[in-house]
Image (cartoon, coloured by chain):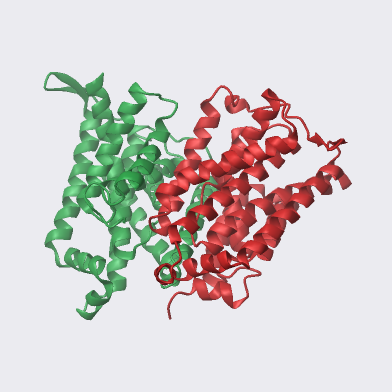
Chain colours: A red, B green
Amino acid sequence: MAAYVLHLAILAGIYIILTVSINLIIGYAGQVSLGHAAFYGIGAYISALVSLHWHLPFPAAALAALLAAGLCGLALGLPTLRLKEDYLAIVTLGFGVIVDLVFLNLEVTGGPDGLPGIPAPSFLGLDFRPPWLYLILVVVIVILVLIAAYRLVDSYHGRALRAIRDHEITAQVMGINTPAYKIVVFTLAAALAGLAGSLYAHYITFINPETFGLHTSILILTMVVLGGMGSIAGSVLGAVILTILPEMLRQAHAYQELIYGGLLMLLLIWRPSGLLGRGKLSLKFLKREG
Amino acid sequence: MFFQQLINGLTTGSVYALIALGYTMIYGILGLINFAQGEIYMCGAFVAVLLLATGKVNFFLAFALGMAAAAILGVLLERAAFRPLRGFHPLVPLISAIGASILLQSLALLLFGPNDRPFPIQFTFSSVEIAGLPVSTLQVAILAAALGFMGLLVVFVRYTTYGKAIVACALDRDTARLMGINVDRMVSLTFLLGSALSGAAGIMMAVYYNATYPRMGMLPGLKAFSAAILGGVGSIPGAILGGLLLGVAESLGAAYISSGFKDAIAFAILILVLLLRPQGILRGRGD
């Protein structure tokens, strides 16, 4: 039982990183990414591959995952983010399909069988195989990510981002380089998803393409909307709830996606600010006119 | 070989074009992407297949009822997922439509199970010679039907009062309202038409691939969206051109480049178009 709780806590930590990162895109830059699981997958695969083939230690592998996912985010964001907001949703969705096909078809990624035997991290003279040690590692990284996210959204740059989200043209007139901001945030979020992927790969020690499909992107999106778009504390809460809830409703497994879809629609109609997005900040940007 | 791939591409492309018309018209009038378009396509196919499986209706009636069911679903979807959220940040209806798409897909999964259903009636198709080359009559029938629907839509939009009212709403919703046009009704009508075409596309593909399943709408829906962007989103001829071009590109790409990456071709094209010519071939309003 204790092992199971530890397992859920580690997974919740990984989902918190994913949710906070995508919330930077949704809640602060006003864009939707439906391919976040692809960056998560890129991070997981790159991290696994560099540890398996080059025997790099975990910090180097995690850094490689972060950079690789960030670069893919940059390459995808550059052509797309100059355009209207809804384009990113489709392009990232298509990107998710492409990445999934790449994982399935390449030899180096093991195709549908995936990659087994990814080493558990061991550095600083510590072996992170025991789950409680791994949990500490995850918690430390989550705290660092949260500090960084709070520092970002409370800074000059965070205010610039919120201005873009609330009214892009006004933001532009105020001298904010809106495409540059959106691209930087998207790249940053992709990089963080890559880091989460690395944490996942070295924890589970086996990855295959199934984990990084569209349903995971939708799950992360639902976590953000449930917690509240534009609220970092909300992201944490959303991630924790939707990690634990499915485990408690095991017998309702078949209804899981149905519940996520319904939850998304109902939340947006009745409570678009989510659970914690109560501050005037979230509602103001959701309700554009009238 | 090349000719065969071209015909295959035109056949699937004409179906993408039908779905793309729905996207483009809805985008034109509301400025929103209807993410659940693929599920409407799936609904049309399921209704027709289930009706035919009862053995009590003939093919044409089942086809018409499938289209009608898709059209009704589209109108209901607009009421449930789009209308309450009008005036919000565009992000909000977008996510709501994603939710609707997931909801409909998993609902179909629960109701009908994950397995492919074959088309209940068997057609006997022969091949005809066109310019000395053999072409399946099934492909000719699908192409002809798709082009027929497109022609009807173009005539409707160009020459009828309701069609012109839709165009007026797409051009400027507020002015259209001042001219006495009931904008809400025109939005419903747009969803009705676009969804009926998607439903027809779904039924044709159910015959073509002889398979109907809950997730069948996802990839065609996404590809049709790419087609709408390629042609120029908001433009009706653009959607038709984009659909046909995308179908051909995909079919040739699968034959000559890599069949494993067949589904990636549409998205590679999408990203290239956004990079090089975001307004699309026929200058929609994507920029």
Mark yes or no: residue B192 visible: no
State which quadrant residue B154 falls in.
bottom left
Q: Give the image location of residue A64, x and y in percent.
A: 64, 37
- In the foreground, A43 or A19: A43
> In the image, what residue occupies the spot 47% across and 35% down?
B116
Quarter of the figure with the C terminus of chain A: bottom left
Q: Give the image location of residue A73, x and y in percent.
A: 52, 45
- In the foreground, A171 or B125: A171
Vertical placement of B193 versus B8: above or below? below
Query: How many badges with numbers are in the image?
Result: 0
Mark yes or no: residue A186 visible: yes
Vertical placement of A167 versus A115: above or below? below
Q: Is residue A220 left or right of residue B122?
A: right
Q: Give the image location of residue B258, x and y in percent.
A: 40, 24
Q: Give the image location of residue A8, x and y in percent.
A: 77, 48
Q: Is residue B163 left or right of residue B92?
A: left
